[in-house]
Image: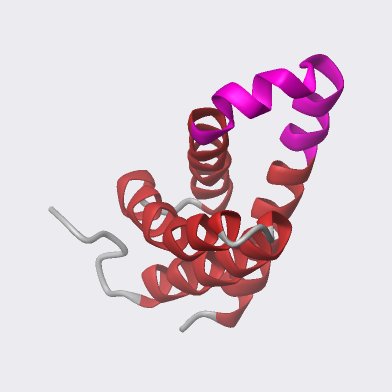
Amino acid sequence: MDRSVLWRAAVAQFLAVAALSLLLAVTLPDSFFDEWGWLSGPLAWLACAALTARALQLDVRAVLLGAVLAGIPSALAVLAGVHWLGVGLAIAAFAAWCAWLAQRPGKALWT
């Protein structure tokens, strides 16, 4: 596991998610999130993950797979009513995935 990538992925994903969350919170009404949060949240998460992949020069498809996997515990946390705790757990899992990817010989899951 590449610890440098672990921390850079965690910081990049945190900053991207925080910035996008603030932008959406300022520009959209609460009712939007009540009706469309189930879709906009995961799409925003994936967009931030793609940005993080580009910034760290990792395979975007492999990083997006990790983002989906890291989003599973986050979705469970949302259902339990602790949305932001779920985001923190997802960022940690996502960063670990990116660090694992970075140390792989081909740095890609598929050829």
Q: Position of residue 61 (x, y in %)?
A: 31, 46
- In the image, is residue 27 part of the stretch drawn in magenta? yes
Residue bounds of the magenta highlight:
19-38
Closest to the observer, 50 or 35: 35
5 lies above or below 72: below
Residue 8 occupies quadrant? bottom right
Question: x and y percent of residue 33 in the render?
Answer: 66, 27
Please say which color scheme the image uses. Answer: secondary structure
Instruction: Please tell me which residue is depicted at 62% across the width and 62% down the height of the picture.
Output: 86
The answer to whether residue 16 is magenta is no
Residue in the image at 58% along x and 41% along y: 48
- Residue 30 picture location, percent across and down: 77, 24
Residue 69, above or below 97: above
The x and y percentages for residue 60 are 38, 45
Q: Is residue 16 left or right of residue 59?
A: right
In this rendering, the count of numbered labels is 0
Please name the residue shown 48% across and 40% down the image. 46
